[in-house]
């Protein structure tokens, strides 16, 4: 992409953040370069250092943006409930891919931006379970139930096509398989609640 004129600092920053957010999910933080982001944004790579202090500052700004967008998305998808329906995360692939790539690249702190920003959907789900159970703090059972739900949610969202291929699930069967897995996930979490 050739450099294009951009109006002011805010416009340059916005282009760089959007480009970096996309690249975090496409290539991951380790492979993403300042020049690559600047080229995608259509601006001079020197702006990354000038406005963000370098690649790390830009990655943080990009993940902050992804977290902010994900939190808004999760609230919309939850439609007034405490958390989104099971397997909704698959519809927010941009965020999911950035988190997974950050974790695979060993950038755990970057992946945990939602937690450090205080807008973690799984953490909010756990706090809701604590409230529902009348606990002061999360116990091991609550943490385990949320962890199991997270593992299924994130694993399904990241690997659905692979899972379908391995299990030989046809297009005609896909909706039924999704429905049954959602039911199993819900039963697992509810069974844990009942066991208490």
Image (spheres, rainbow, N blue to C red):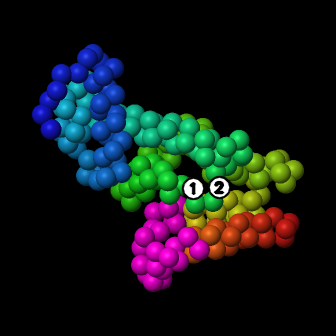
Structural crowding at the residue carrying mark 1, measured as other residues with C-alpha within 10 Å and reported as few (<14), some (14–19) or many (≥20): some
Is residue 159 shown above or below 42? below
Q: Disc 2 on helix, strand or loop?
A: loop
Is residue 16 shown above or below 155? above
Magenta span covers which residues? Answer: 154-176
Q: Residue at x 45, y 68 (%)?
A: 159
Is residue 99 shown above or below 58? below
- Residue situated in front as seen by the camera: 125 or 87: 87
Q: Residue at x 29, y 30 (%)?
A: 15
User: In the rendering, at what x and y percent does residue 187 appear?
Assistant: 74, 70
User: In the rendering, at what x and y percent does residue 141 appear?
Assistant: 76, 64
Quadrant for the N terminus, please.
top left
User: In the rendering, at what x and y percent does residue 25 appear?
Assistant: 36, 51
User: In the rendering, at what x and y percent does residue 93 appear?
Assistant: 44, 53
**Label 1 to label 2, Cα distance in Å?**
6 Å
Q: Is residue 36 left or right of residue 178?
A: left
Q: Is residue 73 visible?
A: yes
Q: Is residue 74 left or right of residue 81?
A: left
Residue behind mark 2? 85
Q: Quadrant of residue 143?
A: bottom right
Q: Quadrant of residue 11?
A: top left
Q: Quadrant of residue 38?
A: top left
- Residue situated in front as seen by the camera: 99 or 56: 99
Q: Is residue 162 left or right of residue 178?
A: left
Residue behind mark 1? 88
Q: Is residue 81 left or right of residue 42?
A: right
Confirm or deny contact between disc 1 and disc 2 (CB under 8 A).
Answer: yes
Label disc, if present, on residue 61 of the rendered structure: none
Q: Is residue 123 visible?
A: no
Q: Residue at x 50, y 76 (%)?
A: 172
Structural crowding at the residue carrying mark 2, measured as other residues with C-alpha within 10 Å and reported as few (<14), some (14–19) or many (≥20): some
């Amino acid at each position: 992409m050739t450099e294009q004129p951009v109006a002011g600092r805010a416009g340059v920053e916005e282009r760089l953040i959007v480009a970096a957010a996309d690249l975090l999910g496409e290539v991951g933080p380790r492979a993403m370069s300042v020049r690559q982001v600047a080229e995608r944004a259509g601006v001079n790579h020197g702006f990354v250092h000038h406005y963000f202090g370098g690649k790390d500052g830009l990655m943080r700004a990009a993940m902050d943006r992804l977290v902010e967008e994900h939190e808004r998305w999760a609230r919309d998808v939850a439609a007034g409930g405490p958390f989104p329906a099971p397997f909704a995360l698959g519809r927010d692939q941009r965020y999911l891919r950035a988190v997974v790539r950050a974790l695979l690249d060993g950038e755990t702190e970057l992946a945990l931006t939602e937690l450090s920003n205080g807008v973690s959907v799984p953490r909010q789900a756990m706090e809701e379970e604590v409230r529902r159970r009348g606990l002061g703090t999360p116990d091991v059972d609550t943490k385990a139930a949320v962890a199991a739900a997270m593992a299924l949610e994130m694993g399904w969202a990241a690997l659905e096509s692979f899972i379908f291929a391995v299990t030989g699930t046809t297009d005609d069967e896909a909706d039924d398989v999704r429905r049954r897995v959602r039911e199993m996930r819900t039963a697992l979490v509810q069974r844990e609640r009942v066991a208490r």
